[in-house]
Image (cartoon, rainbow, N blue to C red):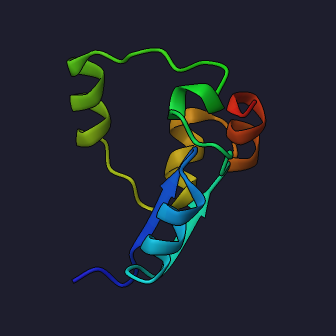
Amino acid sequence: EPAEIVVAVPAAPESTCREFAGLVDDVVCASMPTPFLAVGESVWDFRQVSDDEVRELLATPTVGMATARIRFAETPAEVIARCAV
């Protein structure tokens, strides 16, 4: 049983974020463009990742922000600043 469920996405329609807000503990959405067409339209770099990259990411422990900073060497704010349009 998780202590908390957080949904974090780079971009989504505002209505979707509101809908999830009623189902989980917290929703983090970096961008809610209107009209929403696609996630790829809200970021500068939306390259496809390989199946192997996905498997590696899913197999990597993700405990707290310290783990993310070690793996990616960026804070969440730096990631958003780098990727958001």
Give the side of residue 42 with respect to residue 64, left or right. Answer: right
Give the camera-side residue of 57 and 34.
Answer: 34
Measured from the top left, where is residue 15 in percent x and y?
A: 53, 64
- Which one is in front, 52 or 81? 81
Give 68 or 33, whichever is nearer the viewer.
33
Viewer-nearest residue: 66 or 25: 25
Residue at point 50%, 36% (across, down):
71
Q: Residue at x 63, y 43 (%)?
A: 35
Disc tally is 0
Q: Is residue 14 above or below residue 31?
A: below
Locate residue 37: give its quadrant: top right
**Would you say 32 lies left or right of 62 here?**
right
Provide residue 65's location: percent of width, then percent of height: 56, 57
Q: Position of residue 39 (x, y in %)?
A: 52, 34
**Looking at the image, residue 50 lies above or below residue 43:** above
Question: For the point 75% across and 47% down, which residue is it?
Answer: 77
The quarter holding residue 58 reads top left
